[in-house]
Image: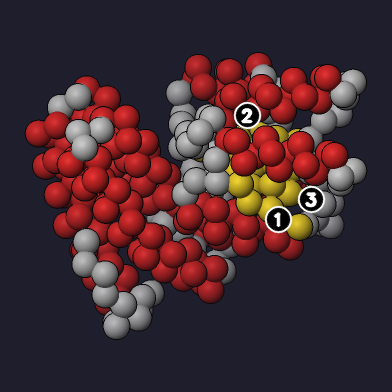
Amino acid sequence: MKILVVEDDFTSRLLLQKLLAPHGEVHIAINGREAIAAFRMAREEGEPYQLICLDIVIPEMDGQAVLQEIRRLEEGEGIARGDGVKIIITTVVQDPLAIMNAFTHQCEAYLVKPIDKGKLIETLRRLGLVLPTKP
Amino acid sequence: MLRRVADDRELAQMVVSAFSSDIGNRLDEMDLAITNRDLAAMCRIAHTVKGAASNVSADTLVTLARLIEAGAELGDWKYVVERVQDLKAGVTGYREVLRTRGWLPTNEEKPA
C-alpha cells in the first residue's frame, strides 16, 4: 500500500510514519500544497496513493481544502465516489462542523488526536486496507 | 502514551524524544510571533503544539497551548504572553520529569 501522511507537526508525523510503515510505503507532505502536488504526481506516474492521513490545520492550504481538491481531481478523472483514495482525517479539531464538513467532502474516517495505534489499525481494517486479525 | 502505541516502549521513547527536541523550535516561533504581534501565527503554532503535546500525553502542555490559542483568537496579547511563559516553564518541567523517569538522556539540554 502506498500512503501519504500530511502533517506539519514533526511529532505527529513521526508517530504516524512509524505506525503505518509496517503496512506500506509512507510518503510525507508538510503542507496542503505539497499534498496536492504529491497526489497529482503519484497519479501521473500510475502509482496512486491508497491512503492519505490528512491533518486539518496545516500551512498553505488547509486539510478541508485539500480534501475537496483531491475529490475534485478524482471526479475530473471519472473516478466514482467511493473508489478514490481512502482519506483519514487525523486532527485535534473536534468541533462538529469540521467533522460534518470532512464527511460531506468524502473523507472515509475522522480520528481525533492523540493518535492511537489501536484505533488507527482498526480504521485501516474497516476500510479494507489491512487484513482482519485472525481470532 | 504507552497504551496508545500498544506498549511499544521504543516507539514511545522515540516520539517523546522527538517532541522534546522539536518543542524548542515551536517556542522560538511563538517568541517571533510575539515580537511581530502576529496573532494568526500564534494561533497556528499553539494549535500545532496542542496536537503534538496530546500525542505524548503532556496534558498540562495541551491545556496551556489551548489557552494560548484561545487568547490569540480573542486578540489578548497580555494573556497570550503570560501563557507562553507558563508553557516554557511547563516544557522545562516536562523534560525534567522525562529525564527523571529515564525517558530522556540526562545530557540532553535545550532550555525552554
Q: CA distance from mark 1 to mark 3?
A: 6 Å
Disc 2 target residue: A66
Horizontal side of A126 relative to B99 (left or right) equals right
Residue B1 coordinates in the image, percent (x, y): 46, 59
Judging from the image, mark 1 belongs to the subunit labelled A
User: Residue at horizontal 48%, vertical 55%?
Assistant: A10
Disc 3 target residue: A2
Q: Which mark is residue A26?
A: 1
Q: Amino acid at mark 2?
A: Val
Query: Are there few (<14), some (14-19), or many (20+) residues within 10 Å of tag 2?
Result: many
Secondary structure beneath label 2: helix
Q: CA distance from mark 2 to mark 3?
A: 18 Å
Of callouts 2 and 3, the N-terminal one: 3
User: Residue at horizontal 82%, vertical 19%?
Assistant: A75
Horizontal side of B92 relative to A107 (left or right) equals left
Q: Are marks 2 and 1 on the same chain?
A: yes
User: Residue at horizontal 55%, vertical 46%?
Assistant: A30
Question: Would you place residue A100 above or below residue B90 in this image?
Answer: above
Q: Which mark is residue B45?
A: none
Secondary structure beneath label 3: strand
Horizontal side of A40 relative to B89 (left or right) equals right
Q: Amino acid at mark 3?
A: Lys
Question: Would you place residue A25 above or below residue A48 in this image?
Answer: below
Q: CA distance from mark 2 to mark 1?
A: 18 Å
Judging from the image, mark 2 belongs to the subunit labelled A
